[in-house]
Image (tube, rainbow, N blue to C red):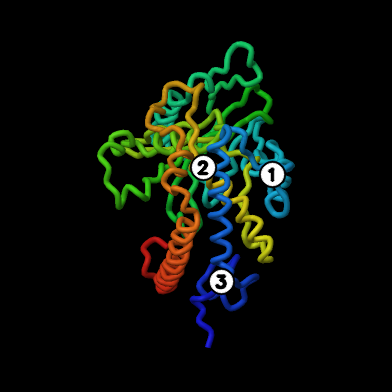
Amino acid sequence: MIDVNNFVAIGGDSSTDWLTPPLVIINKEIEHILIVCVEEYLKQVYEFCKKAKDRFALTLRNTSGKIKKLLNETRIKSHVAHLDSMTCIENYDRRFIRSKYIQDVDANLRDDLMRAFKKYLETIPENKRNPGKNSTNDQVTYKIKDIVARSSPGIGSAGKISYSFLIEGRSETLENDVILYMKPAQKSAVSYVVRNPAVEEYFKHDGLRTVLCSYAMQASTPKWLGYTTLGTIPCLVDAVTAHSEDLDWSDINDFKDIVEVVQYLGRAMADSDCLNTPQDVTGLPFSIIPRDTEHTIRDAVRGQDDAFIQDMLEFGMMYGEQVRRDHRTFFEAFRNNQIPNL
């Protein structure tokens, strides 16, 4: 008899997908994947301890396989084509396409959104909002041309509403228009189980927390990134960009490809853990961002790499089993109409 709990289906999206998965991985292979990921993580952390973190990047020159393909697919995308997929031209101007999930907002909500947008502008660092007199190509009017409400059809985000703003770009040419999203900021998962009054004092606004994390974990942050409050709801605001692509695991059907991808993910995970301290941005409380976290991680491991890898392996296997149990529970509840509004 085969115990299906000892297998993981890559690319499936229901509890019965293990019957015909594109690829089935046994526990030994999962363990190998986890070990490779943690090994690459540690290697990259140690590299950051030796030299400046801002030199790290996954590019076409230092990647191969699925990650390089992903980068190539991202760079050929067009901003105009991206705009055309979400908007249309009416009376010589651009507006959002309406649909079942994309609707107009009423006058009262529009007023609230306009006030929230005005607050959002105050959270954009000055050097990003006004690049300077010599940067005319980057000047932005922040003129709102259209606003719509978007509801998500997905199971994980069913019923959640976000708002899209169509902004006039650096000129009246329609190809320069920009789309921003405003959505409720997610509460930190850790805060549900770990209470730290000092941290909570900093992060009374989850939009601010998300913005600070973005600055800390990314070498380059978008000029549109900011936060606001819609009524009493903390929100995050950022641009919807064409040059963004998710890793599609359903397209990775070879174990060697998975291992190669995981190597890159381990390095990228180290990059996000070894935080930046922004030097040229004012107006945000960056003092909470710790310095030299790569040294903190190295000192915590204390040269016991094998023990650290084993701890991460045990946690990963335990976590995977918990996720599979949770997924089965969710699927059965969903199938039997036990989840409201789904």
Q: Is residue 101 above or below residue 123?
A: below
Q: Residue furthest left?
A: 197
Marks 2 and 3, how far apart in space? 28 Å
Q: Nearer the viewer, mark 3 or mark 1?
A: 3
Which of the pair 305/99 is nearer the observer?
Answer: 305
Q: Secondary structure at mark 2?
A: helix
Instruction: Find disc 2 in the rendering and name its residue.
Output: 272
Quarter holding residue 87: top right
- The percent coordinates of residue 3 (x first, y second) are 50, 81
Residue 127 location in percent, x, y?
A: 52, 19
Q: Amino acid at mark 1?
A: Thr
Residue in front for this viewpoint, 289 or 225: 289
Q: What's the residue type where badge 3 is placed?
A: Lys
Q: Earlier in the sequence, mark 2 or mark 3?
A: 3
Tell me which numbered mark, 3 or 1, is placed earlier along the sequence: 3
Disc number placed over residue 28 in the picture, else none: 3
Q: Which mark is residue 74?
A: 1
